[in-house]
Every structure is written in structure tokens, then in C-alpha cells.
Amino acid sequence: MSTPATSSPSAHPFAESTPLGLLGLAIGCAALTPVAFGVALTPAALRTAAMFCLLFGGGGQLLAGLLALANKNLLGGTLFTTFSFNWIINWWALRELADGHVPDSSIILAVDACFLVIFVVLTFAFGYFSKILVLFLADIDLLYVLRITRELTHAAALGKAIAGCTVLLGCISLWIAFALLVNSSAGRVIFVMPGPLFVATPPAPDRANPAASMGVSS
């Protein structure tokens, strides 16, 4: 996700990478959707979805995250890079399922719980930039809550809700990516990007250095 720059655009070595990561995420979600709804569960379907997860969900987001970090976009780079490895795990899990091997559910549950904590905190952090980013991350939060609940309660019916969250995640990803790509090209707002949910508190003056509070460097 793009966040306000702390330096001039010319100081950034790469172009904004957020659309790349979001489009990769959306394509990965599209590939998972037939599997999540249970309509494509053959070995061939699982292997096909796995490759899209690896290239677009994993590779696209990893590249976007590394470029964002190079541009000193800490939040966006951290989110994309961390999530990209999860999509590589999706690739591995689908390949294993295609070969008749089921990944250990207890390990997946523990990692899902960790991811939930991570994404809840990131949801709060991105609230200082845009409401749609909060919606984006809240959908990921809900997806993990449903995954954890399904594992703990063995409620297979939650699979449809997880599939719905996957579709919604892909749609929100496309909307944000299009807003970043199209709005700047058109020079006007076509895809609406609402403002921040929270207002950041300005840093307190440095009482130990009176010059700092006046913007005077020593």
C-alpha cells in the first residue's frame, strides 16, 4: 500500500509498486476462488491454481514489497513482503493436496493465529492513510478469523464464507490498484479513494532542544 512519502518523489529509485502487488493479489484470489467454492478440486485444478499463487500472489507481491521498501515505504513494503511468503505457502499446500498429501493442520492453525495478530495491528496502522485500506485489511482479518474458527470447530460450512472473503479481497485489491493507476493517468478521480480513518497526532516538541521545536537544525 502506498503511504505518504517522507522525501521528494525524485528521491525514490522506483515507481510506485502498490498496483503491481495488488494486481498480483487479485489474480491469486481469482485462481483460488473455484477451489475455495469447491467447484475445482481435481489434481489438475489444484496444480493450476498453485502456479498462479506462486507467480502472482507470491512473486508479484514479493517484488512489489521489495520495491516499496527500497522506496522507504515501510508499511506497504512490510505488508506485501510478509503476505507474499504466505502465498508461496499456498502454492506449496495446493501442490501437496494435488499429490494427495494434506498439510499438518495444527501448524497451519498456529501460523494463522500469528497472521491474525499481525494483520489486526496493520489494519490499525493503515487507518491513518485510507478507509479503503482499513476495509482491505479488515477483510483479511475476517478471513483468518473464519479459517481459525473452522479449524477449531470443524465447521465445514464456513468454507463458503472464506470463499466469499477471498472474492471480496480480490475486488478491493482491483479497486485500489485501478485508483492508483487510472486516477493519476486521467488527472481526476474516477475510482474513489476515501481519506484516513484516524488522524495522526503531531510529534511533541523536543523539550531538550528548543531549536528543534522551531525547526532550526544545529
Image (cartoon, helix red, strand yellow):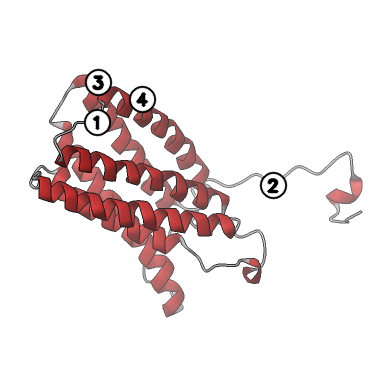
Say if mark 1 contacts mark 4, CB within 8 Å. Answer: no
Q: Residues within 10 Å of mark 3 (few under 14, many from 20)?
A: few
Tell me the amino acid under the disc marked 2.
Pro
* Amino acid at circle 3: Leu
* CA separation in Å, label 2 and label 3: 43 Å
For marks 1 and 4, the one nearer the N-term is 1
Q: Is there a contact, CB below 8 Å, between mark 3 and mark 4?
A: no
Q: Residues within 10 Å of mark 4 (few under 14, many from 20)?
A: few
Asked whether residue 100 appears in the rendered view, the answer is: yes
Judged left or right of residue 12, residue 28 is left
Q: Earlier in the sequence, mark 4 or mark 2?
A: 4
Which residue appears farthest toward the front when viewing the image? 99
User: Dividing the picture into quarters, in which one does residue 139 lie?
Assistant: top left
Q: Which residue is mark 3?
A: 152
Q: Amino acid at mark 1?
A: Pro
Disc on res. 110: 4
Give the alpha-carbon distance from disc 4 to disc 2, as whole Å: 37 Å
Disc 1 target residue: 103
Q: Which tag is nearer the camera, tag 4 or tag 2?
A: 4
Disc 2 target residue: 202
Residue 103 screen position, x and y as percent = 24, 31
Q: Looking at the image, which residue is at 56% across and 54% down? A: 69
Task: Find numbered disc 4 in the image and state the secondary structure of the residue it sits on.
Answer: helix
Which secondary structure, mark 3?
helix
- At which x and y percent is residue 154? 17, 22
Q: Residue at x 36, y 37 (%)?
A: 141
